Amino acid sequence: MSTPGTLITVAPTGAEHTKADVPNLPVTLEELVATAEACERVGAAMVHIHIRDDDAKPTLDLGRLRETVAAVRERTNLVVQLSTGGAVTDPESDRLAVLDALPDSASCSMGTVNFGDDVFMNRWEFIVELHIRMRDRGIVPEYEIFDLGQLTSLHRLLDKHGLPAGGHVHVDLVMGVPGGMAGDTETLAAALRLIPDGATFSATGVGRTTLPVLFAALSAGGHVRVGMEDTISYARGERVKDNAQLVARASGLARIAQRPPLTPDEARALLGVAAQPVTSA
Ligand code: KMH
Ligand code: ZN
């Protein structure tokens, strides 16, 4: 399962933080693309994107998503991953329609989970629909795992419906969500026992679990996701300056672990993402 290099994904925005609370959150197209450029310079190979509207509120507007995919492709070489998770309030129809923006990759959350005071709903039939539509469009999924039972669901999905586009299975363990699995080494080790043979994994720790999960993932031969979607604290009492600061820290630790950051092209090869993007469904 381990590879020599580390895939670093940046999740710069998310759907939960408000611009009022986090003024340095990238919410406009220009802020997002400038962030993506800065993060690529310091070692990111993939960007996990949620977008905002003119009022900085989360949106799944298809026109904006298409414009975002095009702009990030034009100004970076990053693997472009769109969130199909959206915000907890987004309807399934809008979440499925995200795929019409034809990103290189998209998230596919593997089950329903309490999400702080909310519920992040992912019905089985919806998961299957995402998986199949992604394969039809040549979009490589990243299976988002919030709790251990969701890895059992992933086995069920692959057994019943086959491998995804690209033929490779890549999982992201999203740890430390209030309502999901804990973000610590013991839980990561438990998750690794359940990951499908041949799959790669990355991990991200939400909030104060960011560093324990980063260290645990690197030591276990995994990849990492960092970004302001998942944490806005850099250290105790110190706010994150920008996403590139988090990526730079992860890159430094990956180098110390003798597993330097993968380039975007190396990440494409790892994930089974086509060198040339699919531009029509
Ligand atoms: N915003 C969360 C409710 C994903 O991007 O696919 C869901 C989420 C997962 O962030
Ligand atoms: Zn997300």
Image (tube, rainbow, N blue to C red):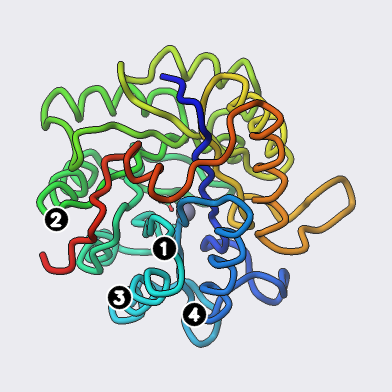
Secondary structure of the residue carrying numbered label 3:
helix
- Distance from disc 3 to disc 1, alpha carbons, whole Å, reads 21 Å
Q: Residue at x 33, y 77 (%)?
A: 61
| Residue indicated by mark 3 | 66
Query: Which mark is nearer the camera, 4 or 1?
Result: 4
- Cα distance, mark 2 to mark 3? 15 Å
- Residue 145: image x %, image y %? 42, 34
- The mark that comes first in sequence, 2 or 4, is 4
Residue labelled 4 has its Cβ within 8 Å of some atom of ligand 2: no
> For mark 3, does the 10 Å Cα neighbourhood hold few (<14), some (14 to 19), or many (20 or more) residues?
some
SS state under label 2? helix
Q: Are marks 1 and 2 in contact (CB under 8 Å)?
A: no
Of callouts 4 and 3, the N-terminal one? 4
In the depicted structure, whether residue 92 falls above or below residue 127: below
First reached walking from the N terminus: tag 3 or tag 1:
3
Does 236 sit above or below residue 188? below
Mark 4 lies on residue: 29
